[in-house]
Image (cartoon, rainbow, N blue to C red):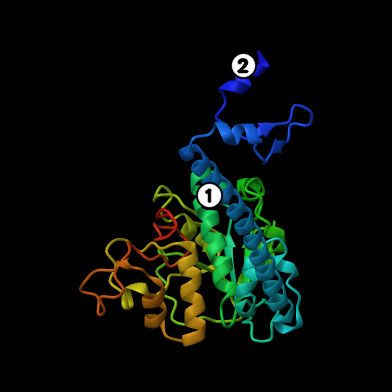
Amino acid sequence: MINYFLSLRSPYTPIISMEDGTVKEEETEQQTETMSKRQRKRLLKHQLFLERRKIKRKEKKERKKAQKRKLQEEGETEEGQTSASVDSFPQKSTFSKRLKLMSSDDASSLRIAIDLSFDDLMSDRDIHKLLKQVQRTYSINRRAKHPVQFYLTSFGGRSKTILEEIKCNYGNWDVHIKAEPYCDVFSQEDVVYLTSDSPNVLSEVDESKAYIIGGLVDHNHHKGLCYEIAVQRGIAHAQLPITEFVKLKSRKVITVNQVFEILLVFTETKDWREAFYKVIPVRKRTEDSETKEVGEENDTVENGGTSEDESEESDEGNN
């Protein structure tokens, strides 16, 4: 029976060794003699393909090794530090020369915190959106000329669980991660809660203060919540002066990372207009804004809410 099936195979199919299961690369003389001219050409073409593929794979491995060595060397020369933080992701070391720590000499003393105490008010889908914004915020701070002191407060619950489920190595982030609420991390006199519902407009950024951004993606289900909490706790609150510089298409709601970046840009430029026009997407602004470039995103939030962001699907939220 075995001989019968062997006789049915293509004349240029490699012979399988019945002893060790390996494929013999050479065809027997008997096989080649029984092949037609077309079959021999196909066999030759197949053999050339296998040889070239082997060579290409080898060359590709060598290129990857050379690239990895180069990236590791670049990482080790960065400000006298090793690329340990990049460990299993050597490609990130290409950015290492631009990354800065909160402990660096040119870092800002300004404190900005994302309040993560709203997990119970959000679905897992919205928490995922919020965490994407948190990750973007972290990335923005690491690449800033003068990184601020970035905090995550009330860290726990579903936010922490989801980050662990997606195997996010947040333990190695250059962030002050606190399980305690912001009111236990900062003195009450230093806290300013950013919320678009506040009647107070922020004119300057005081680097001795701690600015709180509400980590809430709620699709307007809890509008005004952050403001109410600030009033109940007797802490200072304010909204960003967005409407003084930018005309938005809808209500003043922007994402957590946009609020953070606006504050960051302002601390470097001392110019609110530049900060808003640089951060708020054009799609959120109206066409009769002074410059068409900034335009069309829905709203900006003076506090930390969340709205639809271009690259993240964040929904409006914040309060």
Q: Is residue 286 left or right of residue 172?
A: left
The residue shown at (20%, 74%) is: 288
Of callouts 1 and 2, the N-terminal one:
2
Residue 128 marker: 1
Residue 302 in the image, given as x and y percentages of width and height: 43, 68
Residue type at tag 2: Tyr
Which residue in the protein does label 2 denote? Answer: 4
Of residues 93 and 127, the one nearer the viewer is 93
Secondary element at tag 1? helix
Q: Is residue 70 visible?
A: yes
Residue 29 in the image, given as x and y percentages of width and height: 64, 36
Q: Residue furthest right?
A: 19
Eye-nearest disc, 1 or 2: 2
Residue 226 marker: none
Q: Is residue 123 visible?
A: no
The residue shown at (55%, 31%) is: 34
Q: Is residue 265 above or below residue 163?
A: below
Work out which quarter of the rendered image holds the C terminus and state it: bottom left
The residue shown at (72%, 81%) is: 77
Work out which quarter of the rendered image holds the N terminus and state it: top right
Label 2: how many Cα within 10 Å (few below 14, some 14–19, many 20+): few
Of residues 64 and 252, the one nearer the viewer is 64
